[in-house]
């Protein structure tokens, strides 16, 4: 019994680094947000464009984002792809009123994996 437990501990110790490596490479294959405009957490003037750039090409039909103000209402935006398919952006049709905004995005990469997240910015 003692030997069995010790073996299990050794197997777990050997397997753990492999599991970590596997997870890391798997995550790398998904669309990962590499930059946001406005920058996450920034404060500034009303942006003329909201753009999210990813590490790999997105499937436009399955990717998008929503921008909502403090009242939770989403802005009416037309989202277009940019950056050779690795970015999506939208141009607000009017100046955004002062306050906090949340950008909620979802992205599907070529391999069909979906990732999602959110960034925020404040308009002075
Ligand atoms: Cu993937």
Image (cartoon, rainbow, N blue to C red):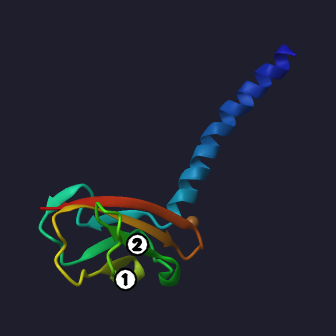
**Quadrant assignment for the N terminus:** top right
Outermost residue on the top side: it is 2
- Residue 51, compared with residue 28, is above or below; it is below
Q: Quadrant of ligand 1?
A: bottom right
Quarter-of-image position of residue 77: bottom left
Left or right, 9 with respect to 118, comes to right
Q: Earlier along the polypeptide chain: callout 1 or callout 2? A: 2
Along the line of sight, the residue nearer the viewer: 71 or 87: 71
Along the line of sight, the residue nearer the viewer: 73 or 54: 73
On the image, the x and y values in percent for residue 16 come to 64, 38
Helix, strand or loop at disc 2?
A: strand
* Residue hosting label 1: 79
At x 24%, y 55%, the residue is 41
Mark seen at residue 40: none
At x 77%, y 20%, the residue is 6
Quarter-of-image position of residue 55: bottom left
At x 72%, y 27%, the residue is 10
How far apart marks 1 and 2 lie (CA) works out to: 8 Å
Along the line of sight, the residue nearer the viewer: 6 or 73: 73
On the image, the x and y values in percent for residue 8 come to 77, 27
On the image, the x and y values in percent for residue 98 come to 15, 64
**Quadrant assignment for the C terminus:** bottom left
* Number of residues whose C-alpha sits closer than 10 Å to that of mark 2, classed few (under 14), some (14–19) or many (20 or more): many
* Residue hosting label 2: 65
Left or right, 13 with respect to 87, comes to right
At x 33%, y 70%, the residue is 67
Helix, strand or loop at disc 1?
A: loop
- Residue 80, compared with residue 55, is above or below; it is below
**Do the CB atoms of the residues marked 1 and 2 lie less than 8 Å apart?**
yes
Outermost residue on the front side: it is 71
């Amino acid at each position: 019994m003692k030997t069995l437990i010790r073996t299990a501990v050794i197997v777990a110790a050997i397997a753990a680094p492999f599991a970590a490596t596997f997870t890391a490479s798997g995550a790398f294959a998904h669309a990962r947000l590499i930059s946001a405009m406005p920058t996450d957490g920034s404060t500034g003037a009303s942006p003329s464009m909201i753009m999210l750039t990813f590490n790999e090409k997105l499937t436009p039909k399955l990717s998008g984002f929503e921008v909502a103000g403090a009242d939770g209402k989403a802005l009416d935006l037309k989202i277009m792809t940019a950056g050779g398919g690795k970015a999506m952006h939208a141009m607000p049709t009017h100046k955004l009123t002062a306050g906090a905004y949340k950008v909620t995005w979802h992205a599907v990469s070529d391999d069909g994996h979906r990732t999602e997240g959110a960034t925020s910015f404040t308009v002075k």
